[in-house]
Image (tube, rainbow, N blue to C red):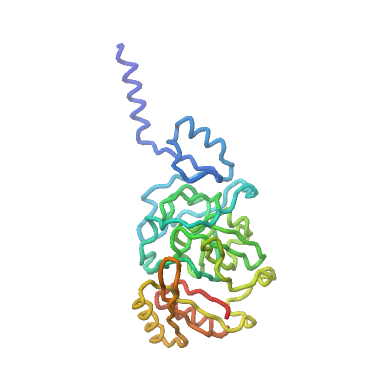
Amino acid sequence: MKALPGLLVLALLAGCAGKPVKPVPQSAAAPRAAAPATGTPAAAMAAQDVPPACLQVREHRDEDYTPGGLYAPGVRDSAPEHALDISNIPEPEPRAEPASRYGNRSPYTVLGKRYQVLDQAEGYVERGLASWYGQKFHGRHTSSRELYDMCSFSAAHKTLPLPSYVRVTNLDNGRSAIVRVNDRGPFHPGRIIDLSYAAAVKLGVDRTGTARVEVAAITGGTPSRTALAPAAASRGPLPAAAPNLGPQIVQVGAYRDEGNARRIAQSLRAAGISGIEVEPVRLHDGKVWRVRIAPVSAPALESVLSSIRALGLPSPRVFSE
């Protein structure tokens, strides 16, 4: 009979062994280091310091994701139940970082569509629709294997190298924020960037769901040449082919291999696109060949962009002459 208490303890432990344990999220201002194991006093203390809006509410399981597909497509994304105060959340400080070991494989395929990751972020400027992602993904691994923190300033992009830094400007209200790109997406047609919930709040996109934005890469601490002046952005949204913008330059891509750049140029010519230029550009870490189309009149811009994307080149960038 003296062995009975010990047997009861073993039985109780066995009953808990298969129960999934919900991970404790990191604080919005905390570094992305590994958190202590759930259930430890340190983890319990960390949970007390997390703002209510930043608590993780969903358990993430491998079976919710199918390679080449979307994560838990039947689950609706949402904003946190509590309001998020972003006044104490710092924007990331752009700095040189090594390429992530994960998330930079190129090309890659999602939902049957192939995407080519850019060799470098320098020179990237694009306008289009931004969306945001929130509570559904909070605490899940991003494509770079960092944990997604909806309470930090980050973003997902289909083709920028991971990590990258960009300035995103809401063309409806002139608000802007610097975000660190560490994830892939959005894979909905017509969208060019998926903002973290904190970034969406700062730009006012949390209220509208989507917004027209300009995304400009920041390399060496300096934003790339933008297609719009800040004053123009503050006046409200501009259509992609606004007549008053004048002729445009469309950059199809920048390639380390000259032969690859010339093959891209040939495929563009075969598609009936004219004004194609292949030019070498010397960067701090070597040379790239840029494939550009110029000039492109404002009325013809959308048609040219559609033709480029139809060739499987998903991220043409637009500059003003």
- Quadrant of image for the C terminus: bottom right
Q: Is residue 235 left or right of residue 264?
A: right
Residue that appears at 62% across and 73% down: 228
Instruction: Find residue 83 and report its horizontal and vertical position in percent.
Output: 63, 48
Observer-nearest of 59 and 98: 98
Instruction: Find residue 203 and report its horizontal and vertical position in percent.
Output: 62, 59
- The quarter of the displayed image where residue 74 is located: bottom left
Residue that appears at 50% across and 74% down: 317
Q: Is residue 309 something one can see in this rendering?
A: no
Residue that appears at 65% across and 62% down: 175
Instruction: From this view, report whether residue 159 is shown above or below residue 10.
Output: below
Q: Is residue 77 left or right of residue 98?
A: right
Q: Is residue 117 something one can see in this rendering?
A: yes
Instruction: From this view, report whether residue 31 is shown above or below residue 303.
Output: above
Q: Is residue 44 left or right of residue 227?
A: left
Instruction: Find residue 96 and report its horizontal and vertical position in percent.
Output: 48, 57
Instruction: Find residue 285 and report its horizontal and vertical position in percent.
Output: 42, 66
Residue that appears at 38% across and 86% down: 270
